[in-house]
Amino acid sequence: MSLKKKVSLAAKNPKLAWHKARVTLFNSVLARFDYSFRNGRARAPKVVSVRLTNLCNMRCKMCGQPKVGDEGVSHDFFTDQLSLKEWQHFIDQIAPFRPNFYLWGGEPLIYGPIFDLVKYAKSKGLLVQMNTNGLLLDKFAHDIVNSGLDDLIISIDGPAHIHDKIRGIDGAFEKIKKGVIKIAEIRTQTKGHPVIRIRGTIFPDNFEHLSQLVEITKEFGADSLNFNHLWFTSEQYGKLYEKIMLDEFSIQAGSWKGFVYQPQDLQLEALKTEIKTMQKSRASFPITVSPAVPLKQLKNYYQNLNYTCGIKSCYSIYFKTYLLPNGDVYPCPDFPDFIAGNIRSQNIMDIWNGPHYRHFRTRLKTKGLLPICSRCCDLFVSSVGFY
């Protein structure tokens, strides 16, 4: 990616650019120092990622999160969530160390007081990001811009018929497009934020259409395009992970079951062609891919779960933390089995450097990655390819 593209994107929100650079610095240097020398302790987190609600208004094919009606999922899983007042109290705790405040779900725009929460976080000096499926953008376009949100990440998987097929809702693409364009127009009028980013996930239903996301990003008036390789595991790796968590932590760990996938339907040569097309794109905006898997290693990535692009340690657990809607704090984004504490009854820093979190960090350092780690987004947090 050219320096001109990077500078252009940074100029749209210098604070966002600074925070992302700071996270890169922590992962590259300071988190590795803590990993090596601090016996499971870590300096204050630089990214706090909040799953505001487990409710969602889509049923995406690649999503491993539990859905309403799934067997064995309790009603409380979707209803037990912190109030605005409780989140505000939490923000007061984290404000002194200025982490990125990242909101997701489920679908975060379903959370009732979402914009009051964003405004409060902004009033405390936090940089606020949101990842959304986009269905409610048109409805809340003015609220999104007026809230001061810094970074808006919208999931798009391809042209309309492909996106709607993957996301399970007819007309979703056009509805999202209308909302994104509306936000871009309001943002221009007010000379405000947020930065608008399109994000797609590689999947058998869309891999032959990935390069079309370049034109879609342009049509939407978005500022950048990112796409992720698929995050997945296997039955074998999942069961091994479950056994380790039971034997070593006395935890029943079943979150992996929604992420079992065998990508035989992914035609790797066709995928390489699409990636090469994007690499040659002359788009005026940045295009990134995560993880930065070399084309010659695509087969390894999708068919060999032992392959991790040469990455052997997880440093994210030294600078990122995650929270569930009920206030539970956990270290791994998609696998909330290990719970280190709950902010309803504990201060976040007491949890962050408490015995449970330190035990988890030390275990990964001394015994190595868990079986499901090999396709976790946080393992590859700094493995980004730029086109």
Image (cartoon, rainbow, N blue to C red):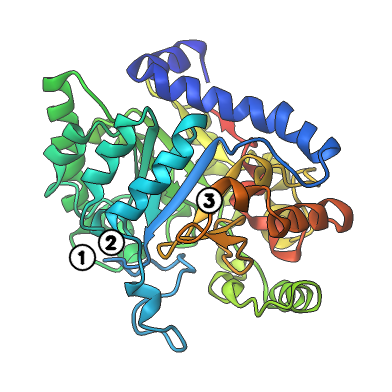
- Which residue: 13% across, 21% down? 190
Q: Nearer the viewer, mark 3 or mark 2?
A: 3
Which comes before the other along the chain, label 3 or label 2?
A: 2
Report the residue marked by disc 1: 170
Report the residue marked by disc 2: 164
Give left or right: position of 61 versus 232: left
Whether residues under marks 3 and 1 lie with C-beta atoms below 8 angstroms apart, the answer is: no
| Residue 128 visible in image | yes
Q: Nearer the viewer, mark 3 or mark 1?
A: 3
Whether residues under marks 2 and 1 lie with C-beta atoms below 8 angstroms apart, the answer is: yes
Kind of residue indicated by mark 3 = Asn
How far across and how far down the image is residue 292, in percent? Answer: 64, 38
Quarter residue 325 falls in:
bottom left
Return the residue nearer the eye: 30 or 183.
Answer: 30
For the residue labelled by badge 1, is the local secondary structure a helix, a strand or a loop?
A: loop
Distance CA(mark 2)–CA(mark 1): 5 Å
Q: Up-down: is 256 above or below 228?
A: below
Q: Up-down: is 139 above or below 284?
A: below
Quarter residue 115 falls in:
top left
For the residue labelled by badge 2, is the local secondary structure a helix, a strand or a loop?
A: helix
Return the residue nearer the eye: 356 or 160.
Answer: 356
Quarter residue 331 falls in:
bottom right
Give left or right: position of 14 versus 294: left
Kind of residue indicated by mark 2 = Asp
| Disc on res. 347 | 3
How far across and how far down the image is residue 262, in percent? Answer: 62, 70
For the residue labelled by badge 3, is the local secondary structure a helix, a strand or a loop?
A: loop
Give left or right: position of 47 versus 133: right
Which comes before the other along the chain, label 3 or label 1?
A: 1
